[in-house]
Image (tube, rainbow, N blue to C red):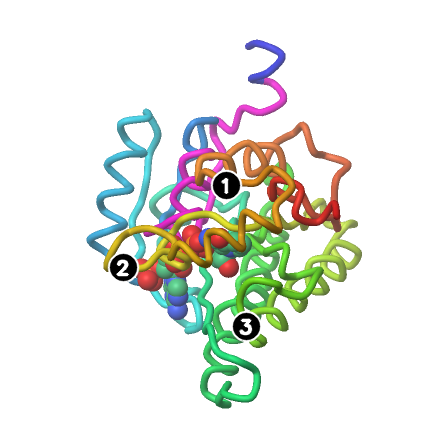
Amino acid sequence: MSHLDDLFGQTGRVAFVTGASSGLGIHAAKALAKTGAAVALVARREDRLNEVARELEAIGTIACVIPGDVTDRTAMEQAFDTAESELGGVDILLHGAGIARLKRAERHTRADWDDVLAVDLNSSFELSQIFAERFRARDDADAGRIIYLSSVMGTVGNSVHRAVSYQAAKHGVQGLMKQLAIEWAGHDITVNSIAPSYFPTEMTVDPATGEIPPAMHERMQLFTPMRRTGRPEEIETAVAFLASRASTYVTGTTVPVDGGWTAW
Ligand SMILES: NC(=O)c1ccc[n+]([C@@H]2O[C@H](COP(=O)([O-])OP(=O)(O)OC[C@H]3O[C@@H](n4cnc5c(N)ncnc54)[C@H](OP(=O)(O)O)[C@@H]3O)[C@@H](O)[C@H]2O)c1
């Protein structure tokens, strides 16, 4: 085994990846597959998950498709049951599912607020609880990893979009991440987040054109020192690092993948 395999290889480990039907979640799943993990793919759109599973199998790993809604705790308990029976005990939780509502604060309804917090924040907590309880019950477990796809919007206000529920939820994820890192440090579980700035995904592109609307794109680039949006594959190395043995002493922190957005 090479030194890099020793540090980053995930052969024999199992990852549970939510948001795996689209965008950054697909690349997170690919990063884990490329390093050798078996991957449970979770989101609501089964057809999309099947496509991703085929891509992962072409990389040479095992993938298991588990359709489900991350806001349904019972469904997520069952999803973990399925992942465990198909692939084995889960070592890595990568929570990538997320939504945003782009509306001024004064137009945000209570339903907008609740929907965003349910997916972006509440499910982060509930999935982490489910993962940690099962991980701790295993004697054979190596090191547990929880990784959230958070956002630069978890630490600063948003100069491009009006999305108060998203800001609040992602700030909540950052607090959750730090507190769980402290509480679970003694259980051999690290808890970290990745903070992307802007990437072209279903969340940010206009479905009619498949591109970020030009006026928005201009603002995104203006606020990014590197003067461009991210390429979705640029998320992969951060995922591989935080999931690996190369990050055994890294917990309670955030890896920005943001072209310098938070460096101003
Ligand atoms: N794109 C960016 O610029 C950017 C920047 C910073 C942070 N992020 C964060 O990165 C993560 C991924 O975002 P993305 O850009 O890749 O967005 P995306 O392309 O819209 O993907 C969102 C994913 O979340 C899943 N999802 C949404 N609601 C769900 C639910 N109730 N249950 C299960 N799955 C659900 C979707 O799957 P289904 O619809 O199939 O369920 C999809 O796989 C999010 O947390 C987002 O906040 C994105």
- Say what secondary structure mark 3 lies in: loop
Mark found first going from the N terminus, 1 or 3: 3
Q: Residue at x 59, y 16 (%)?
A: 4
Residue 181 can be seen, yes or no: yes
Q: Residues within 10 Å of mark 2 (few under 14, many from 20)?
A: few
Q: Indicate the quadrant containing the N terminus: top left, top right, bottom left or bottom right.
A: top right
Residue 132 vertical position relative to residue 250 in the rendered view, above or below: below
Name the residue located 20 percent from the left edge and 53 percent from the top edge.
47
| Residue sitting nearer the eye, 180 or 217 | 217
Residue shown at the point (56%, 64%) measured from the top left = 124
Residue ID for mark 3: 162
Say which of 205 and 13 sits in front.
Answer: 205
Query: Hey, what amino acid is under mark 2?
Result: Pro
Asked whether 257 or 57 is in front, the reply is 257
The boundaries of the magenta stretch are 6-32
Q: Ligand 1 closer than 8 Å to the CB at disc 1?
A: yes
Q: Earlier in the sequence, mark 3 or mark 2?
A: 3
Q: Amino acid at mark 3?
A: Arg
Residue under pointer 1: 230
* Circle 1 SS class: loop
Identify whether 168 is placed above or below 180. below
Q: What mark, if any, has residue 207 been given in the picture? A: 2
Disc 3 and disc 2 in contact, CB within 8 angstroms:
no
Could you tell me residue 21's position as x and y percent? 32, 52
Depth check: 221 or 242 in front? 221
- CB atoms at circles 2 and 1 under 8 Å apart? no
Within 10 Å of the Cα at label 3, are there few (<14), some (14-19), or many (20+) other Cα atoms?
some
Q: Is residue 142 magenta?
A: no
Q: Is 14 left or right of 41, judged from the image as shown?
A: right
